[in-house]
Image (cartoon, rainbow, N blue to C red):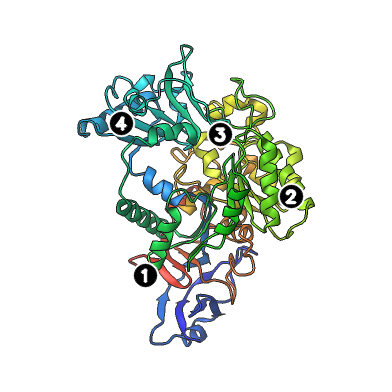
């Protein structure tokens, strides 16, 4: 077999043990798998005329880092607007909006993203504080959770939204004041789409190039793969086009959505869709929602939040969700369910337990996404049911505070805010934890996710105290969440997540050992090289 790639003079890191392999070089065969591990001399001897040979000069090679929860197409589109994620108060938001408005043509839409509800302090979340600066401007401002948005008065007018609406999604809402007038706050997709559908849309060519640029940036940040939690619109066609052109730099597993109201025919279509894929992407699973978010009062909690909200499921009939989980399980289709609140997480675990009791392949692994607050008695059930715990530690870092003065914590109260993002407890209970960013909700660079899981501090100000330091992971546990955990979540532990002969040559090369660098410094470690199937998707100039 011909050799595609040789990396030598390297430190090969084993996430199983946390130590280096005895080998200092590896070779990749024409099939994209690791074909040899050994010393520099014997592995370099495997190189042929067409082999790419790279002297790593002592750099550290890890199995390719995988984002366990990402939205590339959505992210590429949303992050093309005004970034509001850096705004810490209302004045900063107004200043950013005013600067953007000055550059807009008459009648043009203003799009923003990343707005933190904490900027409103004790004021209700709504568009009123921005009315003066957005006077006559159609604007759509996505809140950081991407489950809610603010629409300006002009945008609401253009969309014909002048009062409350009823939606199939139980938690969707056009929030109105006591007089029935919209406040500008739109909760969940059903409400947001009322305005989005009248806003101008980018061309397909623009969307394709934006997606390609986003994926290239991910590869440069060290990512070799992603578990994609949506397949909305023509997303699958975009992945297929990039893949066919050799422009797909990440290995993607895509889970299309199953929404409330999906009937038996819809479930069969989702099952059939599992056959779609290409060289580096494939449909693998189904994404469902059991609730919304705590910050906008649409999570499903066992007790209401401080505003009396977050009291019901995303599915008007949670039993219908349970039935669909059973049908997908029996068809051999893994599921990933967004469940943030304790009641939502409990219902997902109950549904999986019922599905497993009805038969089907026991090797099919289901997942719970986010798991922001759960009581003790749910922890052990993840391992007992072999349910993957998919966590995004940077959400805890950047959207909550150690003193619980943030919106998320105040809504929950001390008891539930004190059990935030229980990464440590889930690992200790035997659960497989996979880590991700949920981009565009939080930045995608995996070294930031890795560091956040360990330090749990606000990335804007790392001098601030950590939120729940007792829930921090060790550097090795965090690395496993992006390597071996991601592989097991995909049912691919036999061919991914380790540096071993026969495993995929999805590789990340770093300038320093991620297990030795202080967690707060990890985002600054240079990514020197990234490879997928042994083909380079990123190479730093110094190599």
Camera-side residue of 48 and 276: 276
Q: CA distance from mark 4 to mark 2?
A: 49 Å
According to the picture, the residue beneath numbered tag 2 turns out to be: 355
As helix, strand or loop, the secondary structure at mark 4 comes to helix
Q: Are marks 3 and 4 in contact (CB under 8 Å)?
A: no
Secondary structure under badge 1? loop
Res. 369 visible in picture: no
Q: Which mark is residue 543?
A: 1
The answer for how far apart the CA atoms under marks 3 and 1 are is 51 Å
Asked if 486 appears above or below 293 in the picture, the reply is below
Q: CA distance from mark 2 to mark 3?
A: 24 Å
| Residue pictured at 46% horizontal, 70% vertical | 58
Question: Mark 3 or 4 closer to N-term?
Answer: 4
**Alpha carbons under labels 1 and 4: distance apart:** 39 Å
Q: Is residue 490 above or below residue 26?
A: above
Location of mark 4 (residue): 96
Q: CA distance from mark 1 to mark 2?
A: 50 Å
* x and y, in percent, of residue 434 in the image: 60, 53
Q: Name the residue rendered at 72%, 36% in the picture.
A: 375
Name the N-terminal-most of marks 1 and 2.
Answer: 2
């Amino acid at each position: 077999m011909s050799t595609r790639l040789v990396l030598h003079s390297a430190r090969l890191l084993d996430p199983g043990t946390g130590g280096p392999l005895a080998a200092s070089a590896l070779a990749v065969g024409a099939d994209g798998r690791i074909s040899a591990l050994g010393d520099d001399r014997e592995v370099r001897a495997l190189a042929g005329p067409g082999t790419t040979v790279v002297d790593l000069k002592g750099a550290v090679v890890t199995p390719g880092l995988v984002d366990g929860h990402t939205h590339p197409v959505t992210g590429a589109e949303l992050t093309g607007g005004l970034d509001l994620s850096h705004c810490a108060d209302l004045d900063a938001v107004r200043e950013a909006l005013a600067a953007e408005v000055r550059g807009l043509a008459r009648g043009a839409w203003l799009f923003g993203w990343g707005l933190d509800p904490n900027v409103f302090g004790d004021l209700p979340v709504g568009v009123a504080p921005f009315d003066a600066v957005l006077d006559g401007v159609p604007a759509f401002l996505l809140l950081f959770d991407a489950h809610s948005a603010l629409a300006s008065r002009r945008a609401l007018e253009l969309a014909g939204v002048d009062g409350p609406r009823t939606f199939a999604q139980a938690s969707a809402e056009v929030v109105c004041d006591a007089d029935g007038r919209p406040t500008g706050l739109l909760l969940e997709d059903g409400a947001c789409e009322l305005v989005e559908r009248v806003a101008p849309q980018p061309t397909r060519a623009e969307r394709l190039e934006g997606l390609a640029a986003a994926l290239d940036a991910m590869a440069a940040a060290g990512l070799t793969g992603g578990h994609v939690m949506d397949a909305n619109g023509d997303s699958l066609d975009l992945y297929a086009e990039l893949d066919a052109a050799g422009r797909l730099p990440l290995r993607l597993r895509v889970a299309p959505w199953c929404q409330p109201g999906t009937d038996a025919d819809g479930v069969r279509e989702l099952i059939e869709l599992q056959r779609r894929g290409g060289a580096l992407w494939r449909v693998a699973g189904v994404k469902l929602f059991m609730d919304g978010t705590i910050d906008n009062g649409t999570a499903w909690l066992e007790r209401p939040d401080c505003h009396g909200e977050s009291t019901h499921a995303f599915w008007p009939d949670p039993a219908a969700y349970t039935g669909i989980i059973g049908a997908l399980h029996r068809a051999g289709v893994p599921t990933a369910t967004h469940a943030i609140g304790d009641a939502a997480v409990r219902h997902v675990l109950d549904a999986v337990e019922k599905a497993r009791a009805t038969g089907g392949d026991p090797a099919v692994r289901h997942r719970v996404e986010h798991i922001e607050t759960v009581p003790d008695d749910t922890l052990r059930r993840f391992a007992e049911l072999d349910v993957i715990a998919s966590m995004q530690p940077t959400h805890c870092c950047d959207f909550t505070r150690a003193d619980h003065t943030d919106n998320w914590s105040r809504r929950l109260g001390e008891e539930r805010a004190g059990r935030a993002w229980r990464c440590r407890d889930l690992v200790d209970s035997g659960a497989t934890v996979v880590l991700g960013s949920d981009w565009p909700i939080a930045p995608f660079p995996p070294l930031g996710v890795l560091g956040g899981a360990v330090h749990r501090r606000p990335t804007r100000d790392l001098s601030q105290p950590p939120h729940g330091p007792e829930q921090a992971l060790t550097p090795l546990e965090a690395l496993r969440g992006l390597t071996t955990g991601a592989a097991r979540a995909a049912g691919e532990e036999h061919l991914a997540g380790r540096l071993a002969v026969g495993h995929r040559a999805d590789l990340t090369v770093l300038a320093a050992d991620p297990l030795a660098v202080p967690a707060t410094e990890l985002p600054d470690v240079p990514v020197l090289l990234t490879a997928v199937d042994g083909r380079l998707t990123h190479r730093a100039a110094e190599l």
